[in-house]
Amino acid sequence: MDEIQYAKGHKYLTLVYQIDQGITRLLWVGKERTIESFQGFFTVIGDQLASQIEVVCSDMWKPYLDVIREKCSQALHILDRFHIVAKMNKALDEVRAGESRKLAQEGHEPLLKKSRWCVLKRKENLTAKQQHRLRDLLRYNLQTVRAYLLKEDFQQF
């Protein structure tokens, strides 16, 4: 399940798809991006069919998570990769910024200066200068480096 914006401003439709081997089809469209709208899908299919759902994929919007937990708790719940990577990048950036401040307060060389995009961008999107900067940075035993390596390991999924 997912949502799409259909007009300027915050106007969304909630979409539910069936994705099986050999078939992908739109099952249901709900107006708005609300708990009530998403619950409307489960009202349409009923409790018996909802209890047969084996796998659900969604983003990490809390109302969606709550409805899925309530209506089909037996299903394997797969979180949208895009949103997981976004949260990982946010955490990595917070680690980098915090460590940079700490190093500056302790009077150390500004190792993390101009490193933000070196650690946040995908390797294939780095400029030559950023590639060299990242290579130099990876030589240090920093929290930022460990967080970066965890983020890169996740890309294998």
Image (cartoon, helix red, strand yellow):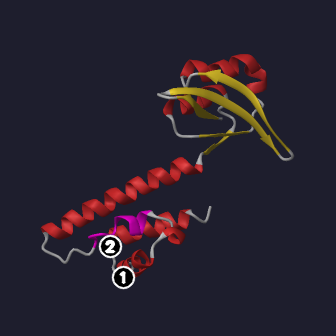
Residue nearest the viewer, comparing 89 with 157: 89
Residue at 58% x, 51% y is 81
- Determine crowd level at label 2: few under 14, some 14-19, many 20+ residues with C-alpha closer than 10 A: some
On the rendered image, what quadrant is the N terminus found in? top right
The spot of residue 145 in percent (x, y) is 38, 71
Residue nearest the viewer, comparing 24 with 41: 24
Q: Which residues are magenta?
A: 112-120
Residue nearest the viewer, comparing 9 with 34: 9
The spot of residue 117 in percent (x, y) is 39, 65
Residue at 45% x, 73% y is 127
Q: Name the kind of residue labelled 2 in the image.
A: Leu
Residue 147 visible in the displayed image: no
Disc 1: which residue: 136
On the rendered image, what quadrant is the C terminus found in? bottom right
Q: Secondary structure at mark 1?
A: helix
Q: Name the kind of residue labelled 1 in the image.
A: Asp
The spot of residue 86 in percent (x, y) is 47, 51
Relative height, residue 20 to residue 35 (above, below) = below
Q: Tell whether 75 sits left or right of 132.
A: right
Q: Tell whether 108 sits left or right of 63.
A: left
Residue 142's disc number: 2
Residue 122 visible in the displayed image: yes
Inspect the magenta stretch and tell me whether residue 132 lies in it: no
